[in-house]
């Protein structure tokens, strides 16, 4: 799904992911409290070649303009409205003690992620399932890829499956060479 204002004209409803880590790890929240991590998939940053020659802070600022604060706020509000419709979360807003809201430009800045894509090359239809690059490099037979940007895909389970597959293939290649 795409978030309100993030490339779909503000259409609701949109998909989002909710994780409640304190349900299985009590250290993920203060005693008597709880914690939620909410992830709203959104479009990645559109790359701008003109920004290659400007200072990093200016470039990140310009990239941040692609997801303006008003858009992020509208998306946050839409998520809170949807959560409030669930039993037990009607007054969720009253219980927010600390909140961190990030957007693709924040990921680009903090982690040097191209286009701010936290889940690989991008997180659009052109990067799902079989459309992700395979594990083998097309032109260099000794280069293999693993991670969120290659098949089988992003998320810890899929990356671990990909790592296992690449490790098996690397061992097979080395054994073929007698190494």
Image: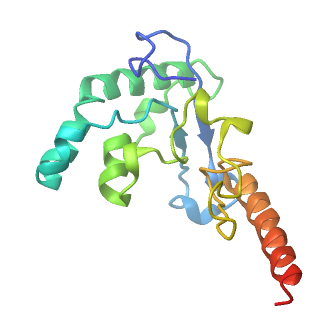
Q: Which of 34 and 73 is in front in this view?
A: 73
Q: Is residue 143 left or right of residue 120?
A: right
- The residue sitting at the bottom extreme is 179
**Colour scheme:** rainbow
Q: From the viewer's perspective, is residue 21 above or below residue 143?
A: above
**Residue 102 appears in the rendering:** no
> Number of callouts in the render?
0
Q: From the viewer's perspective, is residue 37 above or below residue 46?
A: below
Q: Nearer the viewer, residue 178 or 57?
A: 178
- The residue lying at 78 percent from left, 73 percent from top is 170
- The residue sitting at the front extreme is 139
From the top left corner, tell me how far across and down residue 129 is, in percent.
72, 37
- The residue lying at 42 percent from left, 18 percent from top is 7
Q: Is residue 151 left or right of residue 107?
A: right
Quarter of the image for residue 88 reads top right
From the top left corner, tell me how far across and down residue 39 is, in percent.
53, 38
Q: In which quarter of the image is the C terminus?
A: bottom right
Q: In this view, does 172 lie to the left or right of 155?
A: right
From the top left corner, tell me how far across and down residue 1 is, in percent.
58, 23
**Residue 139 appears in the rendering:** yes
Q: Which of 38 and 84 is in front in this view?
A: 38
- The residue lying at 47 percent from left, 23 percent from top is 3
From the top left corner, tell me how far across and down residue 101 is, in percent.
37, 42
């Amino acid at each position: 799904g795409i978030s309100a204002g993030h490339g779909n004209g503000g259409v609701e409803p949109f998909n989002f992911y909710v994780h409640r880590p304190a349900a299985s790890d009590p250290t993920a929240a203060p005693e008597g409290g709880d914690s939620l991590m909410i992830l709203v998939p959104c479009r990645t940053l559109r790359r701008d070649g003109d920004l290659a020659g400007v200072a990093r802070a200016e470039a990140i600022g310009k990239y941040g303009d692609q997801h303006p604060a008003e858009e992020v706020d509208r998306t946050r509000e839409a998520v809170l409205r949807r959560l409030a419709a669930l039993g037990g979360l009607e007054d969720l807003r009253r219980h927010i003690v600390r909140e961190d809201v990030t957007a693709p430009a924040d990921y680009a800045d903090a982690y040097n992620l191209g286009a701010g894509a936290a889940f690989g090359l991008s997180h659009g239809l052109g990067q799902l399932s079989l459309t992700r690059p395979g594990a083998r490099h097309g032109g260099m037979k000794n280069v293999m890829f693993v991670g969120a940007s290659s098949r089988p895909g992003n998320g810890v389970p899929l990356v671990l499956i990909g790592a296992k597959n690449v490790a098996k293939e690397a061992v097979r290649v080395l054994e073929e060479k007698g190494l």
